[in-house]
Amino acid sequence: MKAAVIVFPGSNCDRDVQVALRQAAGREPVMVWHKEADFEEVDLIVLPGGFSYGDYLRCGAMAAKSPAMKEVVARAKKGVPVLGICNGFQVLTECGLLPGVLMRNANLKFVCRDVHLRVENPQTVFTSRYEGGQVIRIPVAHHDGNYFIEKEGLKALEDRGQIAFRYVTPAGAATPEANPNGSLADIAGVFNAEKTVLGLMPHPERLSDAALGGTDGKALFESLAGALS
C-alpha cells in the first residue's frame, strides 16, 4: 500500500500517522505539503489531526480550499480511499466529501482523554480487522468534535451503514457520560455512501503501538494495508 499524508500549516499529527502507516504497510508514505496541487499516484490519502491554518474562520474551512485538497477531492470522487482524523474529519465535512458538520463541544471545552468506541460497520477497507460491536479504546483531543446532521441525513447514515464508530462505555453501552462532545447519536466517525471515505474524531494513530500504551488503533491501519496492498 502506497499512502500520502497531506500536511497543512498547523498539522501536528502528521508524523504520528506517518509512523502508523509505515508500520502497517512496510513502506514510507508520501508527505504532501498543502500547496502541492498535484502529487504521485497513491492507494490511500490521509488527512491528519491538528489545527490547520490555526482553525481560523472555522475548523477545516481554510484547509478545504487548499490546492492539495482540490486534488484529494478529485481522486476521492474516482474511488481512492481517504481517511480524515480529527481535524482531517473536519476538513472532509467542509469540502463536502462527508455529510454533516462538526460543531463546538457541548460543554464548550477542549477534551483530551481516552474514550471507548463501538465498531458499527466492520465491512469496509478501514475496519475489516475489527469485529462488529467490538469496543476499542482510542484517545480524543478536540474542541470541535460535536457531530450534527439533520434528521433525514441521520436516517440515511443509519440505513446505509455509514456510521463507523459510536462513543460508548467500556461495556459497549451508549450513554451521555460516554459521549465526550455531545455528538448526535453518539457518532464518532462516519463513511461516505460508498464507504471509501472515513472521518473520525478519535486518534487511532496514538494507540497503534504497544510503546504508546495500547494497540487498539493498529487494526485500522492494518485493515487498510491488507485491503490496498
Image (spheres, helix red, strand yellow):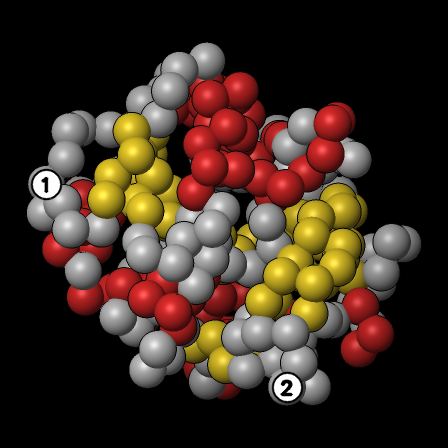
Amino acid type assigned to the residue bearing label 1 in the image: Asp
At 24% from the left and 28% from the top, the residue drawn is 42
Of the numbered discs 1 and 2, the one sitting upstream in the chain is 1
**Contact check, label 1 and label 2, Cβ < 8 Å:** no
Kindly identify which residue carries mark 1. Answer: 38
* Residue in front for this viewpoint, 228 or 53: 53
Is residue 126 at all visible to an observer of this figure?
A: yes
At 58% from the left and 39% from the top, the residue drawn is 205
* Whether residue 37 is situated above or below residue 20 in the rendered picture: below
* Whether residue 199 is situated above or below residue 177 in the rendered picture: above
Q: Is mark 1 on a helix, strand or loop?
A: loop
At 69% from the left and 69% from the top, the residue drawn is 111
Task: Answer left or right for 165 relative to 223.
Answer: right
Q: Quadrant of the C terminus?
A: top left
Task: Answer left or right for 214 relative to 102.
Answer: right
* Whether residue 108 is situated above or below residue 42 in the rendered picture: below
Q: Residues within 10 Å of mark 1 (few under 14, many from 20)?
A: some
Q: Residues within 10 Å of mark 2 (few under 14, many from 20)?
A: few
- Report how far apart the C-alphas of labels 1 and 2 lie in the structure: 38 Å
Is residue 162 at all visible to an observer of this figure?
A: no
Q: Where in the figure is residue 47, as x and y percent of width and height?
A: 37, 49
> How many numbered discs, if any?
2
The numbered disc on residue 134 is: none
Amino acid type assigned to the residue bearing label 2 in the image: Leu
* Residue in front for this viewpoint, 67 or 197: 67
The numbered disc on residue 108 is: 2
